[in-house]
Image (spheres, rainbow, N blue to C red):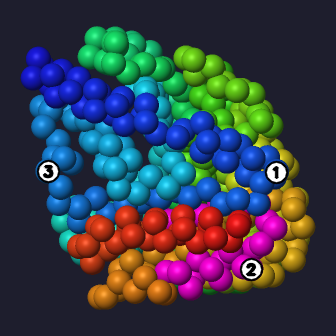
Amino acid sequence: MKEDYKILRNLATKKRELVENFNNDRNIRLWKDTNDLKSTGAPVYITEIPWHEIKDEQLHVLCKNKFLREVEMNIRREIYIMNHFPGNMVFKNEIICEAVIYDSGFGVKEKSRTIIPEKGSTAIARKFKPIIKGPEDIKKFKKPIIHYDEKLTMRRFAVLKDIFDGRLEVRLTGKRGYWFTPWDNLIRLTGVEEMMVDLVKRPAYIEELVKRFVELSMYRLNAYNELAVWGSNNNNVRIGSGGYGYTHDLKEEERNNIGTMTKDMWGCGNAQIFSEVSEEMHWQFSLQYEIEWMSQFGLNYYGCCEQLHNKIDILEKIPNLRKISMSPWADLGKARERIDGKYVLSIKPNPALLAMKTFDEDLVRQEINSILSQTKGCSKEIILKDISTVNHEPKRIDIWTKIVMEEIVKSNS
């Protein structure tokens, strides 16, 4: 363990030096103004990076202890991002110790065949074997068993304090948000094609299925409330499929950030598999039930990879909606016509431009200029995500970020 401590302390010194020279205050203001609907700037955030394609010795994890290896990996990745493609991301002189929460799930586990195109890649394909085939199978779902392991949490907290004291602040946090998306989970159990057919052939069964999932999700949310293990995400935490949650419209996070009320947090929802489902069916089979969860939160983010420019009418029924995802397939012009300054557009440029055999910088400029011109006057964020591959040329992300930052400055001049 002594060698692990030495490795982490050296990394902490490097991180601190970088953070102290980083313009975090300016970036925080930009995120707050954007999320408060007071800015037409466009903060840039990069995530879901193909780390397995970045062959840099500075990313090699050396610690032996399993928990400390994860801490080390996160610091090394932060340092790499700061040095290569920081965009408008925010980096703090701190280490987060998140509460250890045991959550058993709903008692039904997926069965699937997985295809991994390349070792280390997170861009995997799955074929799901249906486990839930009809109304009689809904009874397989059980209430989750949820437990806060305070002893393990505090042991980890003490270890981190011992390692980083005097170098980085160690902060205890609760669970800073939840990826709430009934259909991302349910299709793993029903099968995708089977579920789509049942929307038409067995609508009562589908409604019963999603109602049961949301009922159990609300049991989970209330258990987290009773355990007081939520943590504020009004900070440099990703919200939904977008960027940071900085805002003046929610209570500021506390130093030891555990016990936050959901009314002081961002919530999120989505139904990616409903991208080509009509607005009426999206409401009937998903959104009307998702709202029960989202109504518990002070602000909400909705969407991911589905097209939502043509579903603003139903999205406006979401309580405290603030951000709407705009996938690469969204019609930004139509979205702009409908939002009228009421929401932040969380815009996702096409990551395929980084995957092509030859990286074309002109195509990147064209796409970004199109995005900026179509959304002029809107509150927006630009989120590069789902980067399955950069064709083993990680420098492409650096160049992409540089181009985007340049074009944003030009558009605001």
Q: How many marks?
A: 3
Q: Residues within 10 Å of mark 1 (few under 14, many from 20)?
A: some
Mark seen at residue 195: none
Upstream in sequence: badge 1 or badge 3? 1
Give coordinates of residue 292: x percent, y percent: 78, 48
Is residue 38 visible from the viewing direction of this image?
yes
Give how far across and how far down residue 120 sits, in percent.
22, 61
| Residue drawn where x is 54% and y is 51% of the image | 88
Residue depicted at x 29% and y 88%: 357
Dot 2, crowdedness within 10 Å: few (<14), some or many (≥20)? Answer: some
If the image is split into quadrants, where does the N terminus sit? Answer: top left
For disc 1, the marked residue is 38
Left or right: where 91 falls relative to 370: left
Q: Residue at x 9, y 23 (%)?
A: 3
The amino acid at mark 2 is: Gln
Q: Where, by quadrant of the figure, is residue 66 drawn?
A: top left
Q: Which mark is residue 57?
A: 3
Which of 48/365 is in front? 365
In three-dimensional space, the C-alpha distance between marks 1 and 2, rounded to whole angstroms, equals 18 Å
Residue of label 2: 374
